[in-house]
Amino acid sequence: LLLAQAALIATKRVLVGIADGPLLTNKILMELISPIEDRVSKVTSILMDLKPDIKFDVVPITDVYGPTAWDDQLTCLVVSPETAKGGDKINEERRKKVNVIR
């Protein structure tokens, strides 16, 4: 649902961070999580099916911020109740950067 929401909102680009490395350490049933390459490919495919006319950047992230902390082209974060705390941390970090969140 988050991917669909992001694709519907976006007009130019969607950036998706996919948890990897240290972000997976404490996951339940971690051994069942597909390799990062497979997850990136699947997410890219879903986004292309939803809205093929915009740019997609699907990247592995190893911390809660990923490129959202420094990418000043981002104008919206799409979060779920489960990821809202991370979204708050991201916005806090972005506010520290000049001209990232006004």
Image: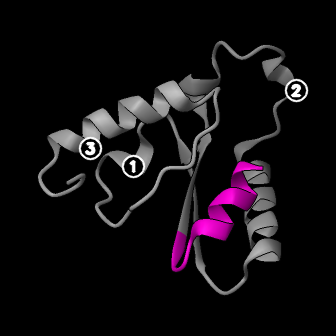
* Residue carrying label 2: 32
The majority secondary structure of the magenta stretch comes to: helix
Is residue 92 in view from this perspective? yes
Above or below for 28 versus 16: above
Q: Position of residue 65 (x, y in %)?
A: 41, 38
Residue 94's image quarter?
top left
Labels 2, 3: front one: 3
Q: Residue furthest bottom?
A: 53
**Nearest-to-viewer mark from 2 and 1:** 1
First along the sequence among labels 1 and 3? 1
Label pair 2/1, CB-CB below 8 angstroms? no
Residue carrying label 1: 68
As shown in the figure, which amino acid type bears the numbered disc 2? Leu
Dot 2 or dot 3, earlier in sequence: 2
Q: Is residue 10 above or below residue 58?
A: below
Quadrant of the rendering where the C terminus is positioned: bottom left
Please identify the quarter of the rendering in which residue 50 is found. bottom right
The three-letter amino acid code for the residue at tag 3 is Arg
Residue 63 seen in this snapshot: no
Q: SS class of the residue under badge 2?
A: helix
Compared across the picture, whether 73 is left or right of 12 comes to left
- Identify the mark at residue 59; answer none if there is no mark: none
Left or right: 41 in relation to 22: right
Residue at label 3?
94
Q: Residues within 10 Å of mark 3 (few under 14, many from 20)?
A: many
Q: Image point 15% across, 58% down: which residue?
A: 99
Q: Earlier in the sequence, mark 2 or mark 1?
A: 2
Amino acid carrying label 1: it is Thr
Seen at 64% across and 36% down, the residue is: 80
Query: Which range is magenta?
Result: 1-13
**Figure label count:** 3
